[in-house]
Structures are given as structure tokens and as C-alpha cells.
Image (tube, helix red, strand yellow):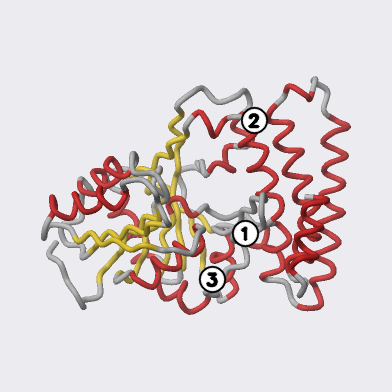
Amino acid sequence: MNKTENQKLDITVAIPTYNRANYLPKLLEQLWKQTGVEHLRWEIIIIDNNSTDNTCEIVTHYQSKWQNQVTLRYFLETQQGAAFARWRAVREAKGELIGFLDDDNFPALSWLKEAVEFGKKHPLAGAWSGQIHGEFEVEPPENFEKIQAFLAIREHGSEPHLFDPVNLRLPPAAALVVRKRAWSENVPQKPALVGKLPGLLVQGDDYEPLLYMYKANWEIWYNPLMHTYHQIPASRLEKSYLLTLARGCGLCICHLRMINAKKWQKPLVFLRTSLGNLRRLLQHFLVYKSPWKNDLIFLFEMEFYWGSFLSPFYYAITNIKFPWVGKLVCLLFL
């Protein structure tokens, strides 16, 4: 594929990255080896989200190595957070489709071809994702499959189907393909979920754009022919990381449910989210029979329910016009 300055492309592969220079060579080599792309017009863009390692040098090396064979562009996004990096990718992409790949998510050799073909077959699809398999540095804990979706591992079978945005059953951004028009016309440029309060991780930044696209009547699909492999280091299976992740995934729930709620429904969403997760907390604790203090999966689920219970209050806090009030309450209760 020759470089094109102004020509619209079939697809842009966008890689938001932060201090993962050790992963980039393998990821770029996997993209270099993609099959069935001889007639595709495509490019790769790297969105460097303030890395302090040698990310830029690695990209420069591959730009020189590939020369005119594959277009590889580099951008520095100084606003910290994956949500800002993805929006920068959308602005810079020349493709009608944008295939997001996390820097630790390696595609199968047919991933690019299958992504484009699915988009052609489903013109109403605003976004689609496939199977994401886990590749673990160490053995995951017992019953890990109960929480693996929280680490962007998704294996939903061999048949394509629509996701269920109403119930927040959506794909992660780790290997997501979007139609640029669906994103740029409907997703607010200022994301609500960026995890910016001091000492507090809040997830949901990958679901937020999908819900806005769904609100504008775009479909969200699962394509089982797209396979990627998520690299899970030992640090992501440690108790401290997993419990922080669980709380962060819970805290975004009310924000996400409010996106497609009508004005009159929002008080009901507030109450149902809080009371429903309080009930789940109590049920989960009461029915559990094993020694829970040593059961990481039980603790993860409890932390997720607790975060979900608090999510309406977090939503209210972050919509208060006096930011210091929100910070104070977060320090006390979150």
C-alpha cells in the first residue's frame, strides 16, 4: 500500500499507547503480516498518550523500515487518558473505519480483513468487536472465568449477534472497530468518564462512546471471525489491582445508564442503580458459604457491587458545580 495524503482510506488501525514500548514491536509486526489486505487502502496511527519510554523511537524505526510499504503515522496526545487518545485517533484517522487496538492486544493475521468485510456486510453497524482471548503470564486464580470480561477477555461463541447496550452488555475498546462517521457525529468531544479525581480509578470510557452511537440508532455487533490475544501480565492478577479495577468498573455504572435515559427517567435510574446493587451486595454476602477473606473472585464481585452501589452518588458528585465538594466526598466515602 502506497502512502496517500488526501485519499480516503478503507480503514485506519489506531493504537493508543502509554509506556508500552516493549509491546509495540510485536504488535506492529502482527499488523505487517496481515493477510487478505492486498486490495485494502489502510494505515496505522500511533497515539502516544505522554509515554516516558522509547515509544517514539520505536515508531520512527518502523517508519524507516517500512518506508512506502505501509503508512505509519505518529501523534502525541498530551491530555492524559484513553478517552482523549481515542478521540485524537478519530480526528486524525483517514479511514472510513477505525480499528482500535490496545498496545497489549495482538490481532490474528486475518483480523483486519475480517473487520473490513463485516463493515461492508452490516452498513448500519456503528461498532463491532470480536473474540478476545487471554494470554497469561501466570496461571489465573480459580474461577477466574467469572470475572475475565472485566479484563477485556470476551469469547461469546461462533455466531454473530447484536450486543445489548440497554443492559450495558457491550464490547471493550481493546479490539473495537467503529465507523468514523458514527463516532464523530454522535460522541461528545469532552468525555465524562476519564478517571480524573485524585487517587480514584473510574472505568467506562470505552462504553461511553458506544452508548452515544446506540442512542443515534447505530448497531453494535459481535463478529466472531475477528480474533485478538490480550496479554495479561502477573501484575494484573494481583489482589490490589483487581480490587481497584472492580471498584472502578462499578463507579461508572450510573453515568453509563444516564446516557440513554430520558429526563424523567433519571431519578428512577439513580434509585434503581443504588438500591439494586445494595440488594446484590447483601445477597452475595449472605449466600456465599466459603471463607470469603481468601477468595479473590468473591472479593472482586463484592467490590464491583459496592462501586455500583456508590455510582449514583459519584454521578451526583461529579455533576455538582463546586468541584471541591465532590473531591471531599470522594475522599470520605470512595
The residue that appears at 40% across and 56% down in the rendered structure is 16
Q: How far across and how far down the image is residue 17, in percent?
A: 40, 52
Q: Which amino acid does label 1 sit on?
A: Lys
Quarter where residue 132 is shown: top left
Compare residues 225 and 180 and report the one nearer the observer: 180
Question: Which residue was labeled with disc 3?
Answer: 213
The residue that appears at 56% across and 76% down in the rendered structure is 216
Quarter where residue 284 is shown: top right
Q: What residue type is labelled 3?
A: Met
Front tag of 2 and 1: 1
Disc number placed over residue 196 in the picture, else none = 1
Q: Is residue 56 left or right of residue 241?
A: left
Compare residues 109 and 312 and report the one nearer the observer: 312
The kind of secondary structure element at disc 1 is loop
For label 1, count other residues whose C-alpha is less than 10 Å away and answer few (under 14), some (14-19) or many (20+): few
Cα separation, mark 3 vs mark 2, equals 35 Å
Q: How far across and how far down the image is residue 199, in percent?
A: 66, 49
